[in-house]
Image: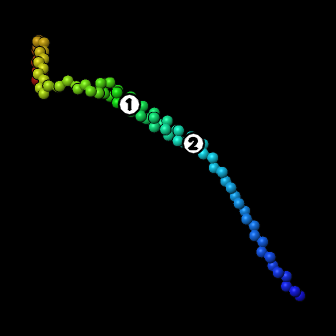
Amino acid sequence: MAEQPTTASSSTTSTHTTTEKSGSTAWLAFLVGGLLVVVAIIAWFMMSGGNAAVEAPAIPDEVDVTVTAPDVPTPSLPDAPSPAPSN
């Protein structure tokens, strides 16, 4: 018998995938960052009273307070009970 030559066949499989990026993450991060900056600016003005350059008035070191109480009459107490007689 005669040998038959073997032929090698090769096949190539190509797989192409397409990834679509919506881009929503970038603009959402930008929007959240912008809102955070706006809230920080509003908080700054609310905490500073709207006048960041104005200094608060000086507080004195000592405070002298005089309070006069009204005269209250002392109540009269009833007489003490007499001791019980002993048997």
Q: Nearer the viewer, residue 1 or 32?
A: 1
Q: Is residue 10 left or right of residue 59?
A: right
Residue for badge 2: 23
Residue for badge 1: 41
Pair 1/2: label in front:
2
Q: In this view, does 83 lie to the left or right of 11?
A: left
Q: In this view, does 17 lie to the left or right of 58?
A: right
- Which circle marks residue 62 in the picture? none
- Residue at 49 percent across and 38 percent down: it is 30
Q: Is residue 87 visible?
A: no
Mark 1 or mark 2, which has the lower sequence index?
2
- Residue at 38 percent across and 31 percent down: it is 41
**Which quarter of the figure has residue 76?**
top left
Question: Which quadrant is home to the N terminus?
Answer: bottom right
The percent coordinates of residue 79 (x first, y second) are 10, 15
**Which quarter of the figure has residue 61?**
top left
